[in-house]
Structure formats: C-alpha cells, structure tokens
Image (cartoon, rainbow, N blue to C red):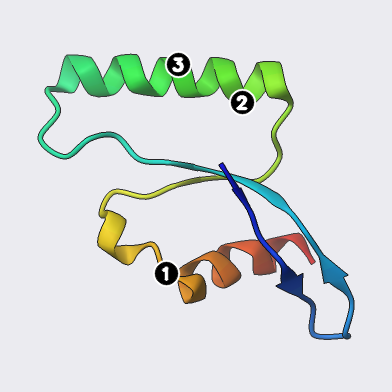
C-alpha cells in the first residue's frame, strides 16, 4: 500500500492511498488464483478505490503511478 503526494494539473494536491497488487514471479497458477482471491477480499473489506495490478515490478515507476491516478481526476 502506498500513500502518494499527487499534484493535479489545476494545482490541487491530494494524497491518495493506493493498493498495488503484484503476485510473486514464477508462481504456479493455483497460487496466483489464491493471491487474487485474497486481494479481492482485502479490497472489499477495506473499501479500497485505487487498486492497481502490475505484473513486472520493474514497471512500477512514478510515471506509471501518475498515469494510473490520472483516471481519478
């Protein structure tokens, strides 16, 4: 879970709480399903609204996060 300082185009600042989900590389399909099931339960229980999935953790950059958060203007 990440708390991120987000500067909007109009100058406003917000601090969205983001849940970023990644299953371990090399997981068996059964384990990936188990991870996904636990993710869904957590998202529902915590009432999370900014939930993102990423396959390759090397892709997790500030640019990637800003692009994802752009949806929530």
> Are the residues flagged by discs 1 and 3 in contact, CB closer than 8 Å?
no
Give the x, y percent position of residue 41: 56, 15
Q: Earlier in the sequence, mark 2 or mark 3?
A: 3
The quadrant in which residue 23 appears is: top left
Q: In this view, does 66 lie to the left or right of 57?
A: right
Going 66% across and 46% down the picture, which residue do you hit?
A: 50
Residue of label 3: 38
Callout 2: SS: helix
Residue of label 2: 43
Give the x, y percent position of residue 21: 43, 39
Q: Which of marks 1 and 3 is nearer the N terminus?
A: 3
* Rendered image: mark on residue 6: none
Callout 3: SS: helix
**Vertical side of 68 occupied by 29: above or below:** above
Give the x, y percent position of residue 1: 56, 41
Q: Is residue 2 left or right of residue 15?
A: left
The quadrant in which residue 58 appears is: bottom left
Rounded to the nearest whole Å, what is the CA distance between mark 2 and mark 1? 22 Å
Callout 1: SS: loop
Q: Earlier in the sequence, mark 2 or mark 1?
A: 2
> In the depicted view, which residue is nearer to us: 1 or 71?
1
**Vertical side of 12 occupied by 59: above or below:** above
Rounded to the nearest whole Å, what is the CA distance between mark 2 and mark 3? 9 Å
Q: Is residue 27 left or right of residue 49?
A: left
Give the x, y percent position of residue 66: 59, 71
Going 39% across and 23% down the picture, which residue do you hit?
A: 36
Q: In this view, does 49 lie to the left or right of 8?
A: left
Rounded to the nearest whole Å, what is the CA distance between mark 1 and mark 3? 25 Å
> In the depicted view, which residue is nearer to us: 2 or 42?
2
Residue of label 1: 61
Please state, as top left, top right, bottom left or bottom right, where the C terminus lies in the image.
Answer: bottom right
């Amino acid at each position: 879970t990440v708390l991120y300082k987000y500067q909007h185009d109009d100058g406003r600042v917000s601090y969205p709480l983001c849940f970023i989900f990644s299953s371990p590389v090399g997981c068996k399909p059964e384990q990936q399903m188990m991870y996904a099931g636990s993710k869904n339960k957590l998202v529902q229980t915590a009432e999370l609204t900014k939930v993102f999935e990423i396959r390759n953790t090397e892709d997790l950059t500030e640019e990637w996060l800003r692009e994802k958060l752009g949806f929530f203007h």
